[in-house]
Amino acid sequence: MLVTGKANAAPKLLACVIAVVLAISVLAGCSSQSKNANVILATTTSVQDSGLLDVLVPLFEQKTGYKVKTIALGSGAAIAMGEKGEADALLVHSPAAEQKLVDAKIVMNYKLLMHNDYVIVGPAKDPAAIRRVKSPSEAVKKVAAAGAGFVSRSDESGTHTKEKQLWTAAGTTPDGQWYIRAGAGMGQTLMIASEKGAYTLTDRATYLAQKKNISLDILVEGDASLLNVYHVMQVNPEKFPRVNAAGAKAFVDFMVSADTQKKIGEFKDKNGQLLFVPDAGKTVEQISGGK
């Protein structure tokens, strides 16, 4: 009987060990899934080219333990990634397109982050004579009338959207050999405009970051219509369960935190120029009224 009892105990013990191992494996798997360490950030080339993310992303990673995979595109392409659930967080500057995502509940935790402004730049000789023209739409109208070169990003980015608004306000449809469709990011578009002695619309931050590499002057600036507003948001996990909701929320919270906002306000390019104004906690109406 004793021998039989020991023989019966062995399989039972083995079964218990297997059950424990399986339980630990399941728990480990769940833990691994709940602690996804990678955050996919879809953002604009203008933010990337400015160098701001080179400062902020390492601080976020150090503070939270997450690793950020930054994909820099035009705002249109970045927003499209959000619409497909291919990104966890977005940092973009195309308010009308962003609002559609908010209304469709594709994104959540939508926060005003910062602003700078757009400027129209061009060759110092200024063949279209737009220097110090107060109205940006009047300036592009003069460029078209003169048949002077104008380089468009033509990538459905926030900058391209703003440019199209200026042409609409001018009552002009840009066309002809003078209108160059780059299909490129802001940094490359500035390089093309410089090489061709042409005009373009750019955010101030990227222009200042690239200033040493190009031969373009700021010719039109300061109008309220040239305000350039950036928002940060997370893709809604109720729409896309596979997104890293915890990581995306941590990123949004980090970007609008007091410490990060201070760093944004203090961030300068290589020439010592301040590039962005921090806006967390404000409204677009407040910052547009202040310009």
Image (spheres, rainbow, N blue to C red):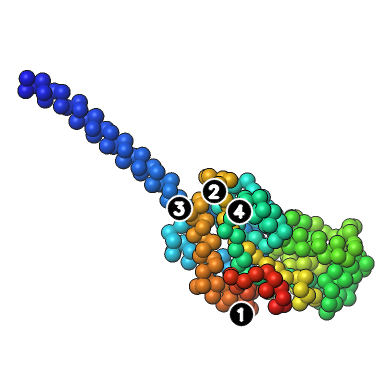
Whichever of callouts 4 and 2 sits on the residue coming sooner in the sequence is: 4
Amino acid type of the residue that numbered disc 3 sits on in the rendered structure: Ala
Quarter of image, res 217:
bottom right
Determine contact: label 4, label 2, CB under 8 Å. Answer: no
User: Few, some or many C-alpha atoms within 10 Å of disc 1 (few <14, some 14-19, many ≥20)?
Assistant: few
Q: CA distance from mark 2 to mark 1?
A: 40 Å
**Between 21 and 202, the one nearer to me in the picture:** 21
The residue identified by callout 2 is 237
* Residue 65 higher or lower than 122, as above or below: above
**Between 145 and 180, the one nearer to me in the picture:** 145
The residue identified by callout 1 is 272
Quarter of image, res 23:
top left
Task: Kindly state the secondary structure of the residue where label 4 is placed.
Answer: strand
Q: CA distance from mark 4 to mark 1?
A: 35 Å
**Between 114 and 194, the one nearer to me in the picture:** 114
- At a point 55% along the width and 52% down the height, the residue shown is 88
Relative to residue 7, is residue 134 drawn left or right?
A: right
The residue identified by callout 4 is 107
Amino acid type of the residue that numbered disc 2 sits on in the rendered structure: Pro
Q: CA distance from mark 4 to mark 2?
A: 9 Å
Task: List x then y, in percent, for residue 70.
Answer: 57, 57
- At a point 31% along the width and 41% down the height, the residue shown is 24
Whichever of callouts 4 and 1 sits on the residue coming sooner in the sequence is: 4
For the N terminus, the image quarter is top left
The residue identified by callout 3 is 37
